[in-house]
Amino acid sequence: MSRYKYEMLLAAQILLSFVSPLFSTSAYARPVVDIAITAVFAAAIIVISNKKIHLVIGMILMVPTLLITWGVNFSNTETMNLISLSGSALFLCYIAGLILADIFRAKMVNLNIIAAGVSVYLFFGNICGFIYAIIARVDSNAFKIPETTASYLGDSLINLSSATYFSFVTLTTLGYGDITPINEFARSLAFLEAAMGQIYLTVLIASLVGIHISTSEKGAKT
């Protein structure tokens, strides 16, 4: 299992990215998204389980966050939502940092390492999504959402699915223009996310793929 741990993590993240918009208007949206988030968290714990200290810190960050996240389904208070979003962002930041360290320490670039790099990219989008949702809850006027957009995303980004949608549209620089950040912090984060997303893809991911192809060709010749 450890051999394919990054592929497993990437699969869980793709699942989360798929079900989040698919069930955004469903009555079961919250529990379905929570199941996908739990799958990502569980896969992330497996990734860092090779070192005890990393596992312990990860569990300390993950367990309370998941308990509160699921608790929101039964007691939907503003405080619990903010703690859930903040805890999730912090946990994913911790995992992403450890994965990046693994990538830079890797002596050989294989598909597992490339999957690790893509996972960090998706983590970046999810982390910013959690932060946008926090901003929307703290400042109800942080984002300008036209009526046509509100018809399918809602009139704010307090919904995690909507916040994640805006995050990935920003990260990939699609820039549909259906949501506009008004809050100063939200605008700064959107700018940083778009810039870092492109830099990450063109520098790290492209380098990893290039090294992997070069290594494979050398191996085939010998």
Image (tube, rainbow, N blue to C red):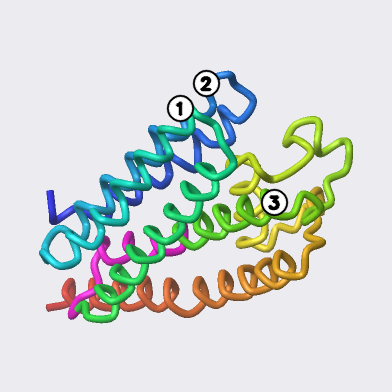
For image coordinates 43% across by 52% down, the residue present is 88
Query: Closer to the N terminus: mark 2 or mark 3?
Result: 2
Q: CA distance from mark 1 to mark 3?
A: 21 Å
Whether residues under marks 2 and 3 lie with C-beta atoms below 8 angstroms apart, the answer is no
Location of residue 15 in the rendering, given as x and y in whole percent from the top left corner? 42, 39
Q: Nearer the viewer, mark 2 or mark 3?
A: 3
What's under tag 2, amino acid-wise?
Answer: Tyr
Depth check: 219 or 191 in front? Answer: 191
107 versus 84 height, above or below? below
Residue 145: give its label: none
Label 2 Cα neighbours within 10 Å, binned few <14 / some 14-19 / many ≥20: few
Label 3 Cα neighbours within 10 Å, binned few <14 / some 14-19 / many ≥20: many
Left or right for 204, reference 105: right
What's under tag 3, amino acid-wise?
Answer: Ala
Depth check: 114 or 101 in front? Answer: 101
Query: Which residue is labeled 1 in the image?
Result: 31
Callout 1: helix, strand or loop? helix
Depth check: 103 or 23 in front? Answer: 23
Callout 2: helix, strand or loop? loop
Instruction: Write down the region rendered in magenta.
Output: 107-122
Label 1 Cα neighbours within 10 Å, binned few <14 / some 14-19 / many ≥20: some
Instruction: Check if residue 102 falls in the magenta segment.
Output: no
Query: Which residue is labeled 3 in the image?
Result: 136
Whether residues under marks 1 and 2 lie with C-beta atoms below 8 angstroms apart, the answer is yes
